[in-house]
Amino acid sequence: MFIKILKYFFLSILGLIILTALIATPLIIKARKEGDRMYVKYDSYTRKTLAENFQLKPYPVKQEYQTLHPLKALKLLKFVINSQEGDKFKRLNTLDATMFLFMKMYTLFILPNYNYNLPMLSVDIVFVGGTRIFVIEIIDPAQIKDENLNAHYEKMRASKTKIKSLEKMVVDMPWAEHVVTDFSIHRRTDRTSDALLFEMYKSYLGTYIEMAKNAEPLSPGLSDKVQQGMEWYVNTLLEQGGPAVNVFNFLLGPEKQKEYVRTVMFGID
């Protein structure tokens, strides 16, 4: 009798799992297609816009880091990185991330050449079905004031007012509050805001490009200050932890995480 009950219980659970999978699969496929479509929209616009404004060339990334798709995460996480460099940019990275089959993330990160007084630009846009997580950070560890930065910072600050009605996300990084500018964006919304978010992205990217094109070379002393500030930011991020660096710690282990974050993700080495 016990065996019959156990067999019945097992078949019931198996049936429930199959039923859940059958119901969920169309939703997963739909969410993935929507995420892929949105990723292509941002990625193609970014590539076209940057190519029109800068001479960029590929930056070689270690083969083991070009695609992260580890069995350790049951092949449910996949990160594909593309790296470039140019006169104004020490590193320009785009990351194509797919998580749990249906979550898609577009990432753009720009580390400026230390010879110019420019901030880092960090963009993460996550598409989970109809949900959107929209993050644009302008990170300025050196905080060297000049007219070029001030003028373009004001443009971004004015643009941010257009999304004031969207839900704010709490950012728990108190150590970075003085270097992540006040016009950085951390918002959560849904697909009804897609047009607004894309316009906001184009506005910030366009302003950053204009600011970079107008940047003048720094003196050696100020260039050192820019380098020291950006290295401090990355080193402190590794020490304090954060969502992205913690994921890579899980996937790669502490030593390779450090190498990946420093040399690939941020490009400071």
Image (cartoon, rainbow, N blue to C red):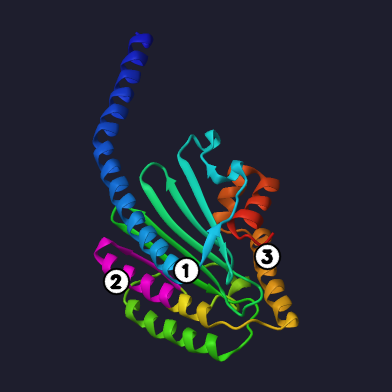
In the image, taking residue 70 as reference, residue 128 lies left or right, namely: left
Q: What residue do we see at 32% from left, 59% from top?
A: 41
Q: Give the alpha-carbon distance from disc 1 to disc 3, as whole Å.
A: 20 Å
**Residue picked out by circle 2:** 196
The answer to whether residue 189 is magenta is yes
Q: Earlier in the sequence, mark 1 or mark 3?
A: 1
**Given the image, on which type of amino acid does mark 3 rest?**
Thr
**Residue at image point 57% right, 62% down:** 85
Residue to which mark 1 is pinned: 170
The extreme front residue here reads 55
Q: Does the segment drawn in magenta span residue 142? A: no
Check the picture and name the quadrant holding the N terminus. Answer: top left
- Residue 160 visible in this rendered orientation of the protein: yes
Corner quadrant of residue 244? bottom right
Residue 251, given in percent of the width and then of the height, sits at 58, 43
**Residue 105 locus on image (x, y percent):** 42, 54
Give the overall secondary structure of the magenta segment: helix
Q: Nearer the viewer, mark 2 or mark 3?
A: 2
Residue furthest to the bottom = 147
Residue 236: give its label. Answer: 3
Please report the residue visible at 69 percent of the width from the left and 72 percent of the height from the top: 227
Neighbour class for label 1 at 10 Å: few (<14), some, many (≥20)?
Answer: few
Q: Name the kind of residue labelled 2 in the image.
A: Leu
Q: Nearer the viewer, residue 14 or 109?
A: 109
Tell me how many marks there are.
Answer: 3
Q: Which residues are magenta?
A: 185-206
The answer to whether residue 182 of the structure is visible from this angle is no
Q: Nearer the viewer, mark 1 or mark 2?
A: 2
The tag earlier along the polypeptide, 1 or 2, is 1
Q: Is residue 108 above or below residue 174?
A: above
Quarter of the picture containing the C terminus is: bottom right
